[in-house]
Image (cartoon, rainbow, N blue to C red):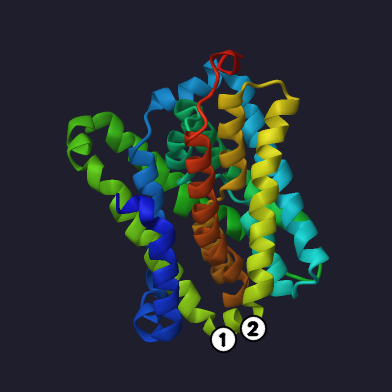
Amino acid sequence: MMTRLFPFWAILVSGLALLLPGPFLTLVPVITPLLAFVMFTMGVSLTPADFGRILRRPAPVLAGVGLHYLVMPLAAWGIAHLLSMPPALATGMVLVGCVSSGTASNVMIYLSRGDVALSVSISAFSTLVGIVATPLLVRFYVSAGVAVDSWALFRSILTMVALPVLAGVVLNTFCHRAVRRVEPALPLVAMVSILLIIGAIVAGVGPSLKEAGPVMLLAVILHNGIGLLGGYWGGRLLGFDETVCRTLALEVGMQNSGLAATLGRLYFSPLAALPGAVFSIWHNVSGSILASLWASRPIARKDRSC
């Protein structure tokens, strides 16, 4: 129940970070370890069988990952230019567009009666592809006037994403019983970690947020909306059923924005972390609304077959 209220907690923590930035600024040095821990909790929820499903059912998985890395980076770049965003914010937008699917998408897909197994497969494959795709896409889409250290981005994604996820999968594989005992608490612990990351980032960009807030929120809403629509109608154009299309919508539209915010702060500027922080709040709000709407609209039996 607590994790379903994530949008509320994220807004509350963001407000507190703006009013009382001091305590949250002390968390800035641990942003990277916190993100690595979140990715570890995602790995603990996976097994080698989740990756095996990619081979058994490649078409929708490849479609989801392909749409994700096609629609979201291009949409981020287009929106940043359309709204004439300054270089730091535009870079942050591109970072949000170029990271892998968000871990919250699995919960939203479950609530919306989508295909949870497919969601897990897309999230896992998207994370693996992102190790290489994210630094390359950032280099491609970020303004030529902004220095991008692609190799440093690759190393960070390797240490903050790939290794923690792998460690989680290994732990789940060899210590399955022990993991099952603590698993119910992991979503809450991961949520608290993400909230601390958001709080630290918002506290660091408080003055800039007050100035750029309206434009930033508009950009994030447009970006997320394009992702949700692109995933759903991309699935329709590819001939997938309603269950798969709902899954693709949320997998494409929901980003690992905590990673984007962390990379923005590490390699560009505190302002470049702002789009990731705002996206972390908004995509959970929109995802919850969409999941509730779809949950109230059962999928007809004829739409369940591929």
Q: Amino acid at mark 2?
A: Glu
Residue occupied by mark 1: 207
Label 1 neighbourhood size at 10 Å, few (<14), some (14-19), many (20+)? Answer: few
For the residue pair 236 and 50, the one nearer the viewer reads as: 236
Element on which disc 1 rests: helix
Element on which disc 2 rests: helix
Mark 2–mark 1 Cα distance, whole angstroms, equals: 7 Å
Residue occupied by mark 2: 211
Quadrant for the C terminus in the image: top right
Q: Are marks 2 and 1 in contact (CB under 8 Å)?
A: yes
Judge from the rendering whether residue 263 lies leftward or rightward of residue 19; answer left or right: right
| Rendered position, 230 above or below 36 | above
Label 2 neighbourhood size at 10 Å, few (<14), some (14-19), many (20+)? Answer: few
| Rendered position, 149 above or below 88 | above
Q: What residue lies at 69% left-to-right and 66% top-to-bottom?
A: 91
Residue 169 seen in the current view: yes
Q: What residue lies at 64% left-to-right and 61% top-to-bottom?
A: 220
Q: Amino acid at mark 1?
A: Pro
Q: Position of residue 238 (x, y in %)?
A: 73, 24
Judge from the rendering whether residue 160 lies leftward or rightward of residue 226; answer left or right: left
Q: Position of residue 130 (x, y in %)?
A: 59, 44
Q: What residue lies at 45% left-to-right and 26% top-to-bottom?
A: 117
Residue 155, disc = none
